[in-house]
Image (cartoon, helix red, strand yellow):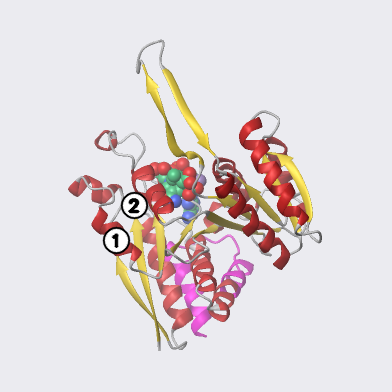
């Protein structure tokens, strides 16, 4: 039987709570499939840092690389915790994994399931995917400050965009659009960020010529936020830079049932490194440890993981169980594990 080596990083805050439920669902979905998930848990995050002072050691990274895929909950301590003032868990752990494992596609689907709560009165059919670039842009960490703490402090944060990096993610987005509804929206801010925006636009225009059947559209990021609220149904595939994609996908989550439903995959399409699946949300210190978190985003991330591993039927069954669970939600409060049990139960039925 096939063995899949899965690295599991529960992380901080609600991370471990939602990952337990995601694992339950993964087990239920693959129980009779002949596939065995061999899981290794990695203790990483603010908790580990506070205990040992380590964020992500070379040994951790090598061990993680030896897996077929990664499931991550969320990382990040309580904002303002003085013991974390010299740590940057987000950069030193999460972004380091995305960069080292060359997760150049950050796939963030948004689908409004029937029955899902949402702020829009008449949203219509909403089903789109944000292809967020994952290894470049303002996230590279190319910056610095001088005269720190003085009235003359200068702080720079440079957005790094390479033709290679932009082209590969744009190509991925066009290929995805070909398999979906053949509509692609490039989102940037070409009117102001002329260098980076110009590169993205020229590359998208060139790749578009190879995909005459894909309808291509361009929006400035500010206008994109308008349409995500007023007419989210217009989108199929959105391709955008790392920071714009981060912001748009919290908004996309909010309009399609809430951040508790938003899943993501950090994909290395070349397969040289394991891809990593995680909810879009963070460690939510405000509700951590209270069984209040919705584990659905983590569970839908398991569906993306299964799909990535080629386990299409299992992935579809997880999505279906989530869909049915959402359809049956009546506003009654359920704990994190009650939601996980209900979804896992549907898979065993
Ligand atoms: P957050 O996503 O953790 O929380 C924002 C709001 O959404 C909070 O009110 C929270 O209670 C709510 N929320 C989030 N997930 C939920 C869920 N599953 N069910 C119900 N409600 C949910 O964002 P934040 O407050 O900006 O960040 C908190 C910490 O998490 C920070 O340290 C941040 O850097 C980190 N973070 C980590 C990741 C990650 O690991 N991938 C992602 C985003 C933020
Ligand atoms: C996300 C998070 C991360 C990001 C942070 C925690 C580094 O917000 O996964 O969306 O900005 O990518
Ligand atoms: Mn984010």
- Position of residue 139 relative to residue 182, above or below, is above
Residue 283 visible? The answer is: no
Secondary element at tag 1: helix
Task: Tell me: 261 left or right of 152.
Answer: right
Is disc 2's CB within 8 Å of ligand 1? yes
Q: In the depicted view, which residue is nearer to us: 267 or 82?
A: 267
* Residue 33 lies in the magenta stretch: no
Mark 1 burial class by Cα count in 10 Å: few <14, some 14-19, many 20+: few
- Spot occupied by residue 304 in the image (x, y as percentages of width and height): 53, 67
Whichever of callouts 1 and 2 sits on the residue coming sooner in the sequence is: 2
- Spot occupied by residue 47 in the image (x, y as percentages of width and height): 26, 50
Mark 2 burial class by Cα count in 10 Å: few <14, some 14-19, many 20+: many
Kindly identify which residue carries mark 2.
12
Q: In the depicted view, which residue is nearer to us: 187 or 301?
A: 187
Kindly identify which residue carries mark 1.
62
Q: CA distance from mark 1 to mark 2?
A: 22 Å
Q: In the depicted view, which residue is nearer to us: 207 or 50?
A: 207
* Range drawn in magenta: 320-349
At 43% from the left and 34% from the top, the residue drawn is 142
* Residue 343 lies in the magenta stretch: yes
- Spot occupied by residue 339 in the image (x, y as percentages of width and height): 48, 67
- Position of residue 320 relative to residue 72, above or below, is below
Q: Quadrant of residue 247?
A: top right
At 69% from the left and 34% from the top, the residue drawn is 190
Task: Give the tally of numbered discs.
Answer: 2
């Amino acid at each position: 039987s096939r063995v899949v080596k899965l690295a599991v990083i529960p992380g901080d805050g609600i991370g471990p709570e939602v990952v337990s439920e995601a694992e339950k669902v993964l087990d239920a979905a693959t129980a009779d499939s002949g596939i065995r998930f061999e899981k290794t848990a990695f203790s990483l995050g603010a908790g580990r840092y506070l205990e040992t002072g380590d964020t992500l050691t070379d040994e951790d990274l090598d061990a993680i690389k030896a897996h077929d895929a990664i499931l991550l909950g969320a990382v990040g301590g309580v904002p303002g915790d003085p013991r974390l003032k010299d740590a940057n868990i987000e950069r030193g752990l999460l972004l380091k994994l995305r960069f080292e494992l060359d997760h150049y596609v950050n796939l963030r689907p948004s689908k409004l399931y029937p029955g899902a709560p949402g702020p829009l009165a008449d949203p219509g059919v909403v089903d789109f995917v944000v292809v967020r670039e994952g290894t470049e842009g303002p996230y590279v960490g190319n910056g610095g400050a001088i005269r720190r703490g003085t009235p003359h402090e200068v702080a720079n944060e440079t957005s790094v965009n390479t033709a290679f990096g932009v082209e590969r993610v744009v190509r991925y987005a066009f290929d995805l659009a070909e398999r979906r509804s053949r509509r692609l929206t490039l989102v940037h801010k070409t009117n102001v960020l002329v260098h980076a925006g110009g590169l993205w636009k020229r590359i998208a225009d060139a790749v578009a010529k190879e995909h005459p059947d894909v309808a291509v559209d361009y929006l400035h990021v500010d206008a994109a936020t308008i349409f995500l609220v007023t007419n989210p149904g217009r989108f199929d595939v959105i391709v955008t830079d790392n920071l714009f994609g981060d912001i748009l996908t919290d908004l996309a989550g909010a309009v399609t049932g809430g951040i508790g439903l938003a899943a993501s995959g950090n994909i290395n399409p070349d397969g040289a490194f394991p891809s990593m699946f995680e909810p879009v949300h963070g460690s939510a210190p405000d509700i951590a440890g209270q069984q209040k978190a919705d584990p659905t985003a983590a569970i839908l991330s398991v569906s993306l993981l299964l799909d990535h591993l080629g386990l299409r039927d299992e992935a579809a069954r997880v999505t279906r169980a989530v869909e049915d669970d959402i359809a049956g939600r009546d506003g009654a409060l359920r704990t994190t594990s009650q939601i996980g049990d209900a979804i896992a139960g549907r898979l065993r039925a």
